[in-house]
Image (cartoon, helix red, strand yellow):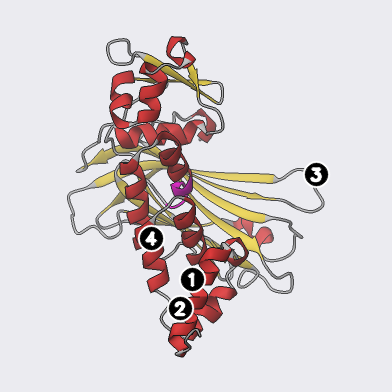
Amino acid sequence: MDAENKSNTDNNYGEIQLVFKLVDKKYFFNPLFHRSEHSIAKIRNLPWTLSLVKKDQIKVTISCNEDSSSNVWKCEADIALEINYHDVRSDTPTKMETIFEGRKFDFNKRIMEETVEQWIDVFNGKIELKGAITVTAKVKVTKLYGYRKRKMLDFSTNHPDYFDGVLLVENKKIYVQKRYLATKSTYFWNIFFGDFKEKEQEAVEIPGVKYDDVIQFLNFIHHTDSQINIETIENMMVLADLFLIDCLMCCCEKILIKADSVNLAKKLIWAERFALNELMDHCLDGFKKMQDFVEFRKNEFYAGVSDDIKSTLLDRVMKIKGYRYL
């Protein structure tokens, strides 16, 4: 399966990814590599999980709908396992892919476990690497029973009875309904109906944003089955800020408040950048003892935290220690 040939609106297809970063050349895997927390994705309205375990061999596990109590569902999927790494002896990164077709999942068989022998040299330290190792599971659901397929819109194709406007993002056309966007965003109201030159253009170019992100944004405001996940949440907040979409920004803020896996310093940086007051209060309220501050200073994103936030944290330290300003 080639992800580049899949439509961005293909609800039957999705990817799950793990990233292992080099942190100490003296050790292997743990702590040599650090597993990303973002290993869950929703594909065809089902939750899929990717995990990798190194024992004597490399075992890759993919689970489907693992926490469901229902026994009236089943699905079939083609799955491609892909690994990307960069051998220091090579000028270009290496990609290996193994394909498993027609894998079946149901209530009694929710997990697929495979030993990928050709990956062992990558993970056992025999190859000197630079950068990260990326493991990706590309899932194409071919059959599904017991789950309703939810609405997804194809913004890459013009439907004259529905769409009447065109956005140009990364030199690709995205077809939209002008008035619907205008009711959601003053940004689009100004572009399509305000006193701007873009109103007369056949296609309105949106610079500095990614095509896939705009597609996900459009699916969100059209209330389709598009899911906002941690991997793309910063990009969604950038678009919510650019397009002045408060409902999207509020949704992202609620997700971040509940997301324990997101780095605390990154939360604080985003809370200040996008004026997310509830998220800011939630993060600051988490500092209750001195050890919380000690650990926070070791955070890999600590340097990116503003002086204003650090000053606020210092005030909390003073209160915890019982100091008072003169």
Q: What element carries label 1?
A: helix
Numbered range of the magenta stretch: 230-234
Q: Give the residue furthest to the right.
A: 89
Mark identifier at residue 180:
none
User: What numbered label is drawn on residue 312?
Assistant: 1
Q: What residue type is labelled 3?
A: Asp
Q: Mark 4 points at which residue?
A: 279
- Give the side of residue 194 with respect to residue 151, left or right: right
Q: Position of residue 155 (x, y in %)?
A: 38, 23
Q: How crowded is mark 4: few (under 14 residues within 10 Å), some or many (20 or more)?
A: many
Between marks 1 and 4 in the image, the one whose residue lies nearer the viewer: 1
Is residue 71 in sight in this rendering? yes
Q: Which of 7 and 193 is in front in this view?
A: 193
Question: What is the C-alpha distance between the residues marked 2 and 3?
Answer: 50 Å
Could you classify mark 3 by the number of other residues whose Cα lies within 10 Å: few (under 14), some (14-19), or many (20 or more)? few
> Is residue 312 found left or right of 300 in the rendered image?
left
Q: Disc 3 or disc 1, which is closer to the eye?
A: 1
Q: Which of marks 4 and 2 is nearer the N terminus?
A: 4
Using the image as rendered, state which of residue 121 and residue 200 is in the foreground. Answer: 200
| Residue of label 2 | 316
Residue at x 36% of width, y 36% of height: 12
| Amino acid beneath label 2 | Arg
Q: Is disc 4 in contact with disc 2, using a CB cutoff of under 8 Å?
A: no
Q: Is residue 33 magenta?
A: no
Image mark for residue 91? 3
Q: Disc 3 and disc 1: Cα gap in Å?
A: 47 Å
Dot 3 falls on a residue whose secondary structure is loop
